[in-house]
Image (cartoon, helix red, strand yellow):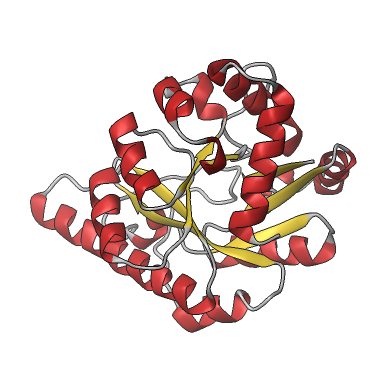
Amino acid sequence: MIIDTHAHLNFKAYKEDLDDVIKRTLDNEIQVINVGSKYETSRQAVLLAEKYDGMYASVGLHPIYSGAEFVKVKTDPDEGEFLIKEQKFDYERYKELAKSPKVVAIGEIGLDYYYRPKTKGKLEAFKARQKEDFIRQLDLAKELDLPVIFHSRMAHNDMISILKQKKNIRGVIHCFTGNWQEAQEYLNMGFYLGINGIIFKLDISETIEKMPMDRILIETDCPYLTPPQEEGRNEPVFVKYVIEKIAEIRKTGYNEIERATYINAKKLFKL
C-alpha cells in the first residue's frame, strides 16, 4: 500500500477524467491526501474525500494568495485561475470545513517569497501578510490537533524562525528543496520531509541519504512535477518513480521505502 501525501486531484487539470484517475489510483492500492490551496480547492478536496474511500483532505490558504495584494502573479491554469486574487484567511470558515472526519491536516500553508515586490516597503508588508496568515493557520491546526502540510519556497530562514517559536506543532515540509543544514533544523523540531518529483530536477541526495527513514514521506504534487519517465500531467500512480529514486539514493529496496513511507504517513496523519 502507498500513500501519496500531497496531491491536487481537486484542481481543474482533472476536470474531464477525474473518476478515471481516481479509479486508476485506488486500483493500484494508492491512497491520497488531496491538498487545498484556498477555500474553493480546500472544499473540493473535502468533497472528494467524503465521496471516495482511500481519499483524504487537507484544507488551508496557500501563501501566494495571502500576499497577492502586493504582486501580480499568474498561477498555472491547471489550478483553474490565471491572475491570482488575494484571499483573506477566514479562521471560522476554514475551521468549519475542517470538521469533516476526512480532513487529516491543515495545509498547504507557509511562506513563499519566489514572486515578490521590488520595493523594500512593499516587500516587508508582503512578508508580514504571509506570516500573519501562516501563524493564524498554525493556531487553527493546534486548536484542532491536526498536523500541518508546510509550503516553503525561498523562505526557509523565516519558516524555521517561526516554527521554533511555536510549540506542539507536527507536520511535513512539502516538496523539500533546502540543503542538509536546513533539513536538520526541521528534523530536529520533529517534522517530516516530503519528497516528490523535484528530486529529478534538484539534487537533494545528501538529505535523502542522511535523513532518518522514519521521517520520509512521499508525494506527487500532481498535476505538477511529472517524473521524466512520463509525459504531460502528473498523477498519483507515478509516485512509484519517486519511491524508486529514493531507494536508489539510499541503496535499499523499493519495498522497504514503500513500507516505511506508508507507516510514516499513517502515523503523522492518523489514518
Q: Nearer the viewer, residue 36 or 185?
A: 185
Question: Residue 24 in the image: x percent, y percent?
Answer: 86, 38
Question: Residue 88 in the image: x percent, y percent?
Answer: 40, 72
On-image quarter of the C terminus: bottom right
On-image quarter of the N terminus: top right
Q: Quadrant of residue 43?
A: bottom right
Q: At x 46% / y 60%, what residue is drawn?
A: 170
Relative placement, left or right, of 14 versus 249 is: right
Q: At x 90% / y 40%, what residue is drawn?
A: 27
> Can the viewer see residue 76?
yes
**Residue reaching furthest left?**
120
Say if 245 sits above or below 126 in the image: above
> Can the viewer see residue 8?
no
Relative placement, left or right, of 119 versus 185 is: left
Q: Quadrant of residue 164?
A: bottom left
Question: Residue 104 in the image: x percent, y percent?
Answer: 63, 64
Q: At x 58% / y 24%, what residue is drawn?
A: 246
Say if 144 sits above or below 77 in the image: below
